[in-house]
Amino acid sequence: MPLDRMDLEAYPWPKRYNVTRVRLRQAFVSQYPAATATNRATHLLFNSSAGDRVIVVRAFTFNGATAASATPIGAQQGALGSHLGTETPLWRGEAIGVGQHFYVDTLTVLPNQQLITPAVSSNFLAALDLPWAVLPPGWAFYIQANAAALTLAASFQWEELAIDDPDLGSIGPR
């Protein structure tokens, strides 16, 4: 029996959720530990594809933002900083994909598309039925510290899909 069907028999999900489309062999995680920033600590998940792959951001975590303060997230064209994160395939033994975890300590305040506010602690986990972002080649999803001199660690979880993949149009809930 295929692995993607085994869990569905033991734990039947509502049909409106598209969990059968998560491709474990095309899923990756990355992390970069906390670094004390002088300016604004910024983590980016960059799609380094030459043009045939998109990245579907499924989840992310961050630690270090002050509690009850808004942390900006969003997407931007291009990468900032250096490729410092560690990427790992979710299915051990598979090749590393096109996602790269960048980190930069920057004066640039990136335009936020959403603000996330941890209510009681400086830890935050964001996982949704819908993806947080779908990144074409050359685009990055970012998490940025909301003030200067904050320490910010982050991790990302994503899938890598071909642009012409028929499942690309149905990556969210049904």
Image (cartoon, rainbow, N blue to C red):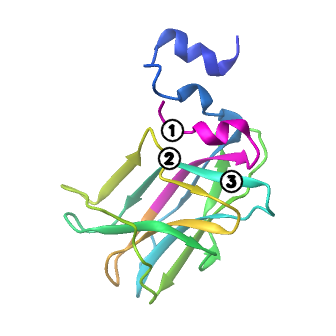
- Up the image or down, 84 lies above or below 12; here it is below
Tell me: 150 left or right of 162: left
**Sequence-first tag of 1 and 2:** 2
Q: Is residue 117 magenta?
A: no
**Sequence-first tag of 2 and 3:** 3
Q: Position of residue 105 (x, y in %)?
A: 49, 83
Q: Position of residue 167 (x, y in %)?
A: 66, 36
Tell me: 172 left or right of 109: right
**Sequence-first tag of 3 and 1:** 3
- Up the image or down, 125 lies above or below 150; here it is above
Can the viewer see residue 91? no
Label 2, residues with CA under 10 Å away: few <14, some 14-19, many ≥20: some
Q: Which residue is mark 3?
A: 54
Quadrant hosting residue 36: bottom left
* SS assignment at label 1: loop
Q: Position of residue 166 (x, y in %)?
A: 71, 37
Label 3, residues with CA under 10 Å away: few <14, some 14-19, many ≥20: many
Report the amino acid beneath label 3: Val
* SS assignment at label 2: loop
Numbered range of the magenta stretch: 154-174
The residue located at (49%, 64%) in the rendering is 33
Tell me: 145 left or right of 95: left
Q: Which residue is mark 1?
A: 172
- Up the image or down, 121 lies above or below 151; here it is above
Q: Which residue is mark 2?
A: 131
Label 1, residues with CA under 10 Å away: few <14, some 14-19, many ≥20: some
- Up the image or down, 35 lies above or below 6; here it is below
On residue 127, the disc is none
CB contact under 8 Å: marks 1 and 2: yes
Report the amino acid beneath label 1: Gly
Give the camera-side residue of 19 and 66: 19
